[in-house]
Image: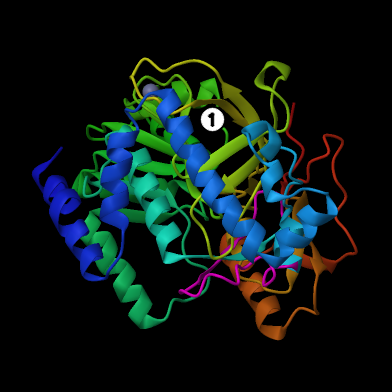
Amino acid sequence: VGFYSGVLENQLIPLYYSLRGRSYARRRSFLEASQWWSRDRIREFQWAELQKLLAHVFTSVPFYQRKYAAAGLRLEDIRSLEDFSLLPPLTREEVNTHREELCSSAYTGRLLSHATGGSSGVPTRFYITPESYDWRSAASARAYSWSGCRVGERALYLWGAAIGKLPRGKAWKTAAYRWFRRELIFSTFQQSDELWAEILEATRRFRPDYIVGYVASLEQFGQYLRANNLQLPGIKGVVAAAEPVFEHTRELVRDAYRAPLFNTYGSREFMSIAAECDRHQGLHIHSENILLETERPAEEGPSEFRVTDLHNYGMPFVRYEIGDMGQLSHRVCACGRGLPLLENIEGRVLDALRTRDGRVVPGELFPHLMKDIVEVKEFQVEQKRLEEISVYVVLSAPLSEASSRTIGSEMAKAFGDGTTVAIHPVESIPKRASGKRRVTVGLPQPS
Ligand SMILES: [Zn+2]
């Protein structure tokens, strides 16, 4: 650990949070220790936290009280994880339709409002408590630390930018926060060789130890480096987020970045859910904060995830259908951590779209954009021809002037001139043969 990173992680950040009366530092040091507990001890802790949460949910969250009563289930009936799996899962649609009823009447503290564009094309708005935020930030910091990318290590991000313009005060605060943590962020929502050249140039000045990015962006930048026979200054690790990682991605990263790839899995509803350690034997789940179940046992192959957040007492998510699928592993990791492993993650493939001048627009742009459009209940973006993009939207209310303008201007920014973008309000978005919705549909691949 570098000197700056050590001071930041062990002194400045804990001090900052404790002055604000927050529990981040406590959670972070707890999670640092608990990852080394035995698998049984972690399981016991998780079950104890789950029982506390269920007592809270059964006594103070109107939506669950009604739903579980209708299913004929009482709190006393849930005596094991098998019993727990009898509780009907929570859907995205329910979160959007019953948001206030999903809030606990016993929780009187502050609620932070959040939104996600959703990997399944259903934007979701929800609340979390500051306490839950501290748990998840601590889990997230732990996940990054497994790759060596601790807070304060120099990291360059191939990421998304804020949609629209941030208010001045907020923009300044964000910039200060990034500078303090030594993070340099590039938006990769509009990709071109000029952007990659600019990023390469920045790595020479900024000398990052880590590169963090969307898988599609990491791949595009990697291909650029390889095609032009260019080399990055020494990188220690590459952290991949938001999309499935295939073997060819690892090979490309190893080859073009000359560094190992660390896969991570998370979502806006929960932040970090799981991440790889340096043994790369699967992704360790943050079981002290998250209970991740699959619809079917691991032996039967990948199936739908259900996620329970153990510490969001303001608006509890219990057995939430997050829209991703994968497989839990029974293997024990050679690193010695007792945290269970997730074998693989499937079902978050977002097609990239293309611009007329040959640039690539990653699929992540669209969930990122749509989370801020409050009238949109569900959406799909399809590129039928190079110069024609259709945005299908299921609306809860007619699109306001401002919302149409935001969609129009963000699309124009990404695709440039000569591409028409048509917004089509529809009754519903058809599911594909796989039963999954596709958020983006790119041009047919030339075979
Ligand atoms: Zn491990």
Give the residue type at disc 1: Val
Q: Residue furthest left?
A: 3
Question: At x 45% / y 46%, what residue is drawn?
Answer: 193
Question: At x 49% / y 42%, what residue is drawn?
Answer: 48
Q: Position of residue 249 (x, y in %)?
A: 50, 27
Q: Is residue 176 visible?
A: yes
Magenta span contains residue 242: no
Give the side of residue 362 with respect to residue 401, left or right: left
**Is 11 in front, or is 82?**
82
Q: Give the range drawn in magenta.
A: 98-121
Displayed quadrant of residue 79: top right
Which residue is disc 1 drawn over?
245
**Which secondary structure is most common in the magenta stretch?**
loop
Displayed quadrant of residue 299: top right
Residue 40 sits above or below residue 401 on the image: above
**Is 394 in front, or is 91?**
91
Residue at disc 1, secondary structure: loop
**Is 81 in front, or is 367?**
81
Q: Residue furthest front?
A: 76
Q: Position of residue 356 (x, y in %)?
A: 65, 53
Magenta span contains residue 104: yes
Residue 166 sits above or below residue 445 on the image: below
For ligand 1, give the image quadrant. top left
Q: Is residue 266 visible?
A: no
Where's the N terminus, which quadrant? top left
Q: Residue furthest bottom?
A: 401
Q: Position of residue 411 (x, y in %)?
A: 63, 65
Give the side of residue 206 with respect to residue 428, left or right: left
